[in-house]
Image (cartoon, rainbow, N blue to C red):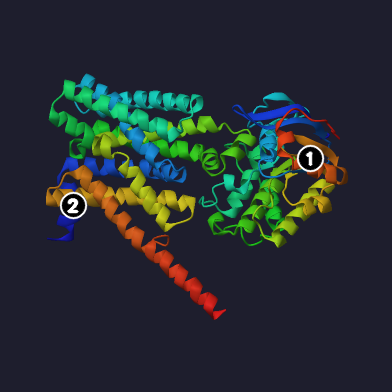
Amino acid sequence: MSIPAIGFDDVSVAYGRHRAVHGVSGAFAPGSLTAIIGANGAGKSTLLKALMGEIAPARGRIDRGGLHIRDFGYLPQISAIDRQFPLSVADTIMLGAWRQTGAFGAVSAQAARRAKDALAGVGLDGFANRPIGSLSLGQFQRTLFARLMVQDADIIVLDEPFAAIDARTACDLIKIIRRWHGDGRTVIAVLHDFDQVRAYFPNALLLAGRMIDWGATDQVLSRENLKAARNPVENRSGSTAVHGS
Amino acid sequence: MTLHSLCVAPFADYGFMRRALVASVALGVGGGPVGVLLVLRRMSLVSEAMSHAVLPGAAIGFLLAGSLSLAAMGLGALVAGLIVTFLSGLITRTTSLKEDASFTSFYLSAMALGVLIVSLGGSNLDLLHVLFGTILAIDAQAVCIVAAIASLTLIVLALVYRPFITECFDPLFLRVVGGRGSLYHFIFLLLLVLNLVAGFQTLGTLMAVGMMMLPACIAKLWTERLAVMFLIAAVSAAVSGFIGLLVSYHLGFASGPTIILTASVIYAISLLVAPSGALGRLFRRRHFSNARTEV
């Protein structure tokens, strides 16, 4: 099955009466690599939560191209996961095989082999039996990336994958993201570092409580757009022009 | 006094001691692992609240049966537990109150109602029995019920292990992959209520949760591996039951509180000497700072 585009049609997301982000229209093209960027509170993670079905849009529509949420690979912010939980690295990675095993099924030899390969792929060879509580933040993020590799999803959504991790780990994880992109998967990542976005992400979606621009990274990160993203008064009122790709 | 007369004779000579031992071991085997999951879910206080919230149901069962019937009290408590679970879930979803707050408000009201029901229909002695249990008066039927609940708990844990663990560790992931988190949460609360019911006659409504939480905390201090944690919790609960019964027999102490206090002593020792206890952490810090100095 080919990967569908993920479309947003005038999507607004709110927490109760507080509108977190509005006026988002456009599409993540099949096989695209897109960074969602903006300042703190710009609505990046909120938009991802709407995409992952955790929050229903207050207005507009998200078209997942007939895919179910379980077809997505999702990496939440690292703070959303209990890092002291008494699980081994291998057990954590094996959760990625849920689509094959379900809640009760046995782990197949093929899934076990995939988990072993994923462990090696993220540079954690020899860590299989280590409790996750003993890992550094970077090692834990590598473990979650390995879980995503085992999940083998066509659409991968990453919420701040490089937050608070060391530069070397970030560099290794970017290589994995680019490999996914090379495989033809759609990758969507919330990021803070504009230099990283310019260097590695061909597409970008700039948010500031509303959609500022969505398209090729060079175009989106123009001086005018960045200035518009810094203007809080304008961003809190009304809708905005739409530049979907 | 020989070792035989100290440790074996009380159980060899008296049927009520044997029944009490089997009941407390079964209680530990079922309740220990449930306690571990409660600790890992940070639901320790919710379990305490739940143990009080089911009191009106247990009290009504007690009055209808006219005695400390585990079957009648258990059924009443189960119904009360399900109602409380449903209502607090409803309040959490429809208001700004979190689950711990809604459970707490229920437990305070339910506790008052339960004590009122027992005191209206029974004597002060009955009230004491409901609140603190009478493990030495446990009959064969009650032992069978406790054992059945322990067996059911282990079977359900084995079957639903993966969703339970995933729901504790990363609930968002479970939702994304299509696991029904709320269903597993409900099954877990059901197991909690069943194990509280099992603890009613042995330890009473006030201390039933002690046989889950103390062994779970002991286990958490000794290991970082989940399977071993389950095992340590079950074994330490069973050992607390064994030692607690012996101490209560020889010294003439009330058996329920003695069992819980035995678990408390094991917990206190673990706090000091376990790998994640105070001395263990201190030693590790020293070890690492020495290693850093050498580097």
| Three-letter code, disc 1 | Ala
- For image coordinates 31% across by 26% down, the residue present is B109
Residue B240's x, y, as percent?
Answer: 28, 50
| Three-letter code, disc 2 | Val
Mark 1 or 2, closer to the camera: 1
Residue carrying label 1 = A228
- For image coordinates 22% across by 31% down, the residue present is B130
The kind of secondary structure element at disc 2 is helix
Q: CA distance from mark 1 to mark 2?
A: 75 Å
Residue found farthest to the front? A233
Residues packed near mark 2 inside 10 Å, few (<14), some (14 to 19) or many (20 plus): some
Foreground of the two, A200 or B157: A200
User: Is residue B148 left or right of B177 when viewed as pictured?
Assistant: left
Work out whether residue A206 can be spotted. yes
Residue A3's x, y, as percent?
Answer: 81, 35
Using the image, determine if residue B19 lies above or below residue B71: below
Residue found farthest to the top? B64
